[in-house]
Image (spheres, rainbow, N blue to C red):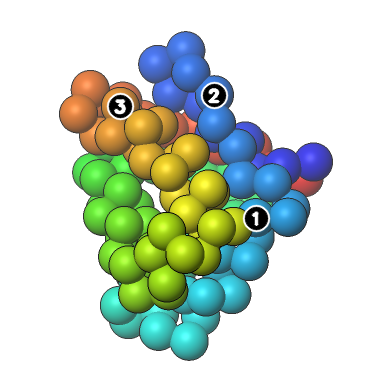
Amino acid sequence: MPFDMYANGQHEAIGHQEEFIFALIQADGQRFPALSALWSAYYDDPRLSSAQAGALLHELIDLLASHGGAANKALAHTVVRLLPFFSMACKGGHEIRTESD
């Protein structure tokens, strides 16, 4: 079961096969505090504010840029898929409700 996220009637998820993004941030957790916090609370079903969504949006872009960009196809696919969801939550001021297994 994936890490499901809901905001403003929209749904997105981080699947188990995509959890590798959290391994990438562990080496440099200070650079990615929002992603590190999300990983720490991953199985606690956290609620994320629109400000946290904005931080996640920027950290995902930075993560992709620092790990091969578009050449890293698995990471690029995951990040590009998640960006619109976090952008919508950030710009619309929507809280994100999460559920994980």
Q: Which of marks 2 and 1 is nearer the N terminus?
A: 2
Q: Mark 3 points at which residue?
A: 88
Q: Name the residue under label 2.
A: 11
Secondary structure under tag 3 reads: helix
Left or right, 45 with reference to 16:
left
What is the spatial separation of the Cα atoms under label 2 and label 3, in whole angstroms?
Answer: 11 Å
Q: Vertical placement of 15 versus 87: above or below?
A: below
Q: Are marks 3 and 1 in contact (CB under 8 Å)?
A: no
What is the spatial separation of the Cα atoms under label 3 and label 1, in whole angstroms?
Answer: 21 Å
Question: Mark 3, mark 1: which one is toward the viewer?
Answer: 1
Q: Can residue 5 be seen in this view?
A: yes
Q: Vertical placement of 58 versus 7: above or below?
A: below
Q: Which residue is drawn at 51% across and 65% down?
A: 72
When asked about the image quadrant of residue 49, the answer is: top left
Secondary structure under tag 2 reads: strand
Left or right, 16 with reference to 93:
right
Q: Vertical placement of 89 versus 63: above or below?
A: above
Q: Earlier in the sequence, mark 2 or mark 3?
A: 2
Q: Residue at x 34, y 52 (%)?
A: 56
